[in-house]
Amino acid sequence: MLRDARSLAVALLACLLALAGCASPATRRAVPTSTTLPPSIVVTTPATVATTSPATGPPVGSSSPPGASARPTEPPSGGITTNRRCETPPAASTGGHPRTITPQAPLDLLITGDSLQESEGPQLAAYANAERHVVASCTVPKYSTGLVRDDFFDWPAYARQLAAERDPEAVSFMIGGNDGQNMKVGSRILQAGSAEWAAEYQKRAAAVMGAFANGHRTVYWIGMPIARSARLTGIYRVMNDAVRRAAGSVSGVRFVDIWAMYAPNGHYQDDFADESGRVRRMRNSDGIHLSVAGAAFLARRMLAILNADWHLTG
């Protein structure tokens, strides 16, 4: 009996030690040392609350990906929209040129022509926005068109339609990449670059200018740059002279001569220095179109011209 009582006492003592935490090593490893909240519960402290800060980068408290810039990607508060949706015509401009340009009433600029305007137009808008010029622009390029093949595309008719729909204050127009070819007038074929061809080209250019200007708009007709091809270079010279004469006959039209810009040494070059002295690839592989850098070069020139005429920075 005494032996049984002692055995019982030892067993009770072992149980008391177990309750005090004397478990096996395996059991101890399975016991968590801290309490973890379920995945659906998120603890937010005031220091990490994500708040929206318009036009100032990612939310406060969030982390940007490696290399991300903290600079704003949108104009500061109170800025203007410079890439207006072309499908939504703006309110009709009032006052004409000259007038006071403000953020509330930016210059309404239509940029159009052939594929030569595809890159220059958006870059002009981007530079205007970056430098806080007040320009609201819309770029409408019509690919593979020109003035020579009026049987393919009627630019005077389209210019009237586009001007009526958009009603811009100013128009930046550039065309001619596809015009280095013969022209058919009635039953006659006019040789590209000939005197008769130049006279007809001048007539057609004047019709487009008149449709856009319509007595109250300012039209900036950008001339053709030098080409890699000697044949096209000769035709483009004749074309520019014809357009220059046409501009002199239509009120409100200004011819923008860019020939020397793209022939810094008097001849064609793919690569040359921009206004800052940095050498860039300025022309595309076809020897006609401008590269992205070449279009940016032109966009900065056009913005300077517009600023001088309209006082965009006030």
Image (cartoon, rainbow, N blue to C red):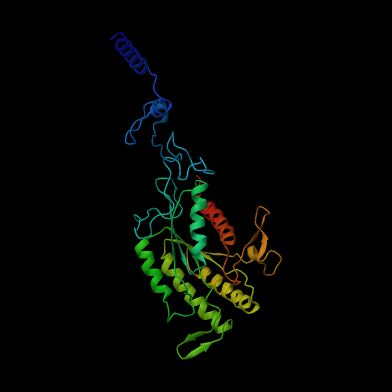
Residue occupying image coordinates x 64% and y 76%: 229
Taking the view exactly as shown, the residue that stands out farthest to the right is: 265
| In front of the other: 97 or 70 | 70
**Is 49 drawn above or below residue 235 in the view shown?**
above
**Picture coordinates of residue 81, whole percent (x, y):** 42, 49
| In front of the other: 296 or 165 | 296
Residue occupying image coordinates x 61% and y 66%: 283
**Picture coordinates of residue 184, whole percent (x, y):** 48, 86
Residue 180, by quadrant, is: bottom right
**Is 158 drawn above or below residue 120 in the view shown?**
below
Taking the view exactly as shown, the residue that stands out farthest to the bottom is: 187
- The N terminus - image quarter: top left
Residue occupying image coordinates x 44% and y 79%: 150
In the rendered view, does 215 fall on the left or right side of 262? left
**Is 63 drawn above or below residue 8 in the view shown?**
below
Taking the view exactly as shown, the residue that stands out farthest to the top is: 2
Residue 300, by quadrant, is: bottom right
**Picture coordinates of residue 105, whole percent (x, y):** 40, 48
- The number of callouts visible is 0
Residue occupying image coordinates x 39% and y 19%: 22
